[in-house]
Structure formats: structure tokens, C-alpha cells
Amino acid sequence: MTAVLDPSPPTAHPGAQRVAQQVAQHRRRRARRVLVVGVVLAVAVVAVFVLTMSVGSSGVAPLDVLRSVVAPGSDPRTDFIVRELRLPRALTSLLVGLALGISGTVFQRLLANPLASPDVLGIASGASAAAVAGLVLGNLGGLALSGAALAGALATSALVYLLAWRQGISGYRFILVGIGIGALMGSVTSYLLSKAEVADARAAFAWLVGSSGMAGTAQIQVLAAAVVVLGPLSGLLGRRLTVLELGDDTARGLGLHVERDRRLLMLVSVVLVALATAAAGPIAFVALMAGPLAARLVAGAGSGIVASACVGALIVLVADLLGQHLLPVTLSTGVVTGLIGAPYLVWLLIATNRSGAGG
């Protein structure tokens, strides 16, 4: 007897089809949530960006602000108020927030610890120490100051990486080493200030407080170029970051060069935080807060880098708006973010200790 073969393909099991449909629906919901959250945050950033240029001793209508920024020339008085007096400060706040938001979430996810931000890891302290050395010893400014901050951040991050390396990188060990190196960089900064001339020390102290109003044109341009280039690059590397979160062995099994990709992501983040620090001084806690807040908004969907950047920009813009116009006394941007971030850090330490994630 000759066997008759059925040429039709096998029918998938109904249970497997339902699971596949549920997975596809879940992915669509996650992608839709990421898109909606990203659009809402971007609109909020633009709205607050315009608002910071509308409020002041001479109020300007939001539509007039937009007209002056996009197509100047219709009203010289408004153009002077917006473009000359307020736009540099608002643009600095926007760029610093974007840079710190990206760098913070990358470090936190690479090291799998919400405490792993450039503030805690000593990288911002290294950039600050180098910048203070440039201000006190060399009277640097503009591009030279940005270069000094970048060199200090790169040297500090390399030192932390080498000291924390033990056949791989442990997030808890990296944080402990970073805290120690950060304290060392703080001591260097204090020593430089103690030996500086009074005028130089006063300028350095003003810079160390952190303010969006100190950046020169060259520093804003350098930071803008870095955000425009490295921001999208961080987004493209977001998938590699997601795979690295699965663990080194799994990432290698999926074809990643673990240490090379980790170093590349760290390098991008270090450059962003260094140039942000050079432009506005050390703006505390923004990198620490932006990533976890964005993660809650997107509910773990996607890489979260775009959302983190927008949240960081919102924090700095709102902090500068509060410090300049909405509080009884005028405060620098870094002081306001410190007042917001210090209670958050205490809460985060308590929550991390309770969950056992702090080591």
C-alpha cells in the first residue's frame, strides 16, 4: 500500500496562536505608550521652554516668544528681550537637562542600580575639579573650560573603571569606588579654592553653585553639538543597553561585544555630563532623578532614553524658572535642584535598602 502524504502545512495549535497574538498586542501597547509619553513630554518641554522666556520683569506673550525665536525682526524690543537676554539661559537649561537625563539613565541601567548617576559616581566631581583648576590656575573660559571639564571627567571615569574592574564590572563595586573618587575630587577642589586669589575663588564658588545663566556662546554651541550628535547615538545604542541588562553571558550569547559596548555607552554619557557641567556648573541630582521618573512613565517599555532626556530637561527648566521668578528669593538652578533632589535621594536610599538592591 502506498502512503499518501498531506502537502498542506501543519496547523498551529490554537493555544500557541492566542499566545502569539497576546505577545503582539502587548508589544503594540508598549510601543504606543512609549510614543504617547514621548510626545507628551516633548510638548511639555517646549511649553516650559517658551514659558521661561515669557516670564520676567518685562512679560512677553508666548506667541511673541515663538515668533522672535523662529522669525525675528518684527519687533526689535521683543527680539532683544527674548534672543539676547533670555534665550541663552533657556537654551542652556534645555541642553543641560537633556544631557544629564541621557547620561544618568545610561549609567543607572548599565550598572543596574538607581544610585549609579554621574553625581554619585564621581564623574561630575572630576569634571568640576578640572574646571575649577582651569578657572583658578589658568583663568580659562569658553572652549578651553569645556575641554578642561571633559578631560577631568574622562580621567575620573577611567580611574573609577580601572579600580572597579575585577574580571568584569560589578555595579555595587563601581558605585563604591566612584563615591571614593568623588570625595577625592571634592578635596582637590577645596584645596584649589583655598589657594586661589580672592577674585578667582569667588568666580569658582559662583560656578560651583550651578546656574543656567553662566554659559557663554561657545559653551552653548559645544553642548548643543554634543546633544545633537550623541543624543541620537544614545538612542541607537538603546537596544544594546537593553541586551546588556540581561547579563554579560546572555549578551555575549546574543552577539554583543560586552566590554566594548559598555565602554562606548559610558564614553557617550561621560562626554555629555562633562560638557553640561562645563556650561552650567554641577547641577545636582538631575541625572539621578530623570531615569527613574521616566521609567515610571513608560512603565519599562522601550529604552527610556528619550523620555529620560525630556524629564531631565523639564527638571532643569522648571528649577531655573522657580529659582528666578517664582520663589520669594532668587536662587541658582543648582540650589533648586538640590532642594528637590536631596529628599529624593534619602527616599531612594531607604527604598533601595528595604528591597535589598543596595548590596
Image (cartoon, rainbow, N blue to C red):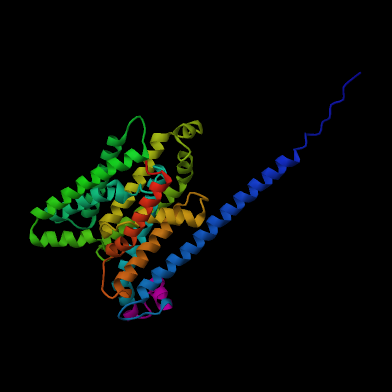
On the image, the x and y values in percent for residue 245 come to: 46, 41
Image position of 247 with respect to 68: above or below = above
Residue 99 in view in this figure: no
Image position of 117 with respect to 279: above or below = above
Q: Residue at x 30, y 36 (%)?
A: 164
The residue furthest top is: 1
Q: Choose between 28 and 81: the one closer to the eye.
A: 28
On the image, the x and y values in percent for residue 214 come to: 24, 64
As drawn, is 122 to the left or to the right of 239?
left
The residue furthest front is: 354
The picture quadrant where one finds residue 160 is: top left
Residue 186 in view in this figure: yes
Q: Quadrant of the N terminus?
A: top right
Residue 70 lies in the magenta stretch: yes
On the image, the x and y values in percent for residue 346 come to: 34, 55
Q: Quadrant of the C terminus?
A: top left
Q: Residue at x 43, y 56 (%)?
A: 293
On the image, the x and y values in percent for residue 9 come to: 78, 34
Residue 129 lies in the magenta stretch: no
- The main secondary structure of the magenta stretch is helix
Image position of 316 with respect to 3: above or below = below
Q: Choose between 113 and 317: the one closer to the eye.
A: 113
Q: Residue at x 27, y 51 (%)?
A: 124
Q: Which stretch did the figure color magenta?
A: 63-78
